[in-house]
Amino acid sequence: MKYSFFNREAVIGWALFLLSIIYGFLAIGFPKGGNEPGPSFLPLVLSGGMLVCSLIIVFKHRKVEEAKEENPAFRIGRKHLFLVIYLAIYLILLPVIGFIGMSLIFLFLTFRLYDNKGIFRPIIYSVILTFSMYGLFKLFLNVPLDLM
């Protein structure tokens, strides 16, 4: 079997690779924390982790190709592709719209993507999760979230 670096899994891996680099450059511009980790610490860690994971996806897709030969039903669904697109839009618009607004939109769209049982439940879940994360970082950890 001939392997291509441009099958569906590899394309998603390359897209995540590009997003992790862009997000890492955006995170470098966040305020530094001095002696303590500041607002740029977690985004830089996430960017590095996403960079490593995306490279694993790109270079390990051969095993996915072999699994497809054994099980033709094995494939990445549209929902997962939309999730990657939502994540890309979230990362790009986070500095523009802010943490609370963009997180509400991202979580609402993600919950709607995976739970098609109405609109009320995704709204409640996204509000609870967004403000829980805000409370965790802003109030308990005293991390200045300048992206409000």
Image (cartoon, rainbow, N blue to C red):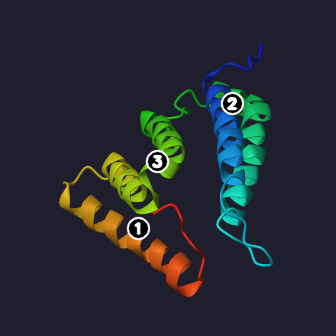
The quarter in which the N terminus is drawn is top right
Q: Vertical placement of 94 versus 15: above or below?
A: below
In space, the residues marked 3 and 2 are separated at their CA atoms by 25 Å
Residue ID for mark 3: 96
The reply to whether dot 3 and dot 2 touch (C-beta < 8 Å) is no
Relative horizontal placement of residue 124, taking residue 80 as reference (left or right)? left
Which quarter of the figure has residue 126? bottom left
Mark 3 or 2 closer to N-term? 2
On the image, the x and y values in percent for residue 109 come to 34, 48
Which quarter of the figure has residue 103? bottom left
Instruction: Indicate the secondary structure of the residue bearing disc 1.
Output: helix
Q: Quick one: 119 or 106, which is closer to the camera?
A: 106
The quarter in which the C terminus is drawn is bottom left
Q: Quick one: 79 or 139, which is closer to the camera?
A: 139
Q: Amino acid at mark 2?
A: Trp
Relative horizontal placement of residue 76, taking residue 102 as reference (left or right)? right
Q: Vertical placement of 43 versus 93: above or below?
A: below
Residue ID for mark 2: 14
Q: Quick one: 36 or 85, which is closer to the camera?
A: 36
Q: Residue at x 68, y 18 (%)?
A: 6
On the image, the x and y values in percent for residue 58 come to 74, 32
Which callout, 3 or 2, points to the residue nearer the camera?
A: 3
Q: Residue at x 35, y 72 (%)?
A: 128
Q: Residues within 10 Å of mark 2 (few under 14, many from 20)?
A: some
Instruction: Indicate the secondary structure of the residue bearing disc 3.
Output: helix
Residue ID for mark 1: 130
What is the residue that sits farthest to the bottom in this orientation? 140
Q: Residue at x 51, y 84 (%)?
A: 139
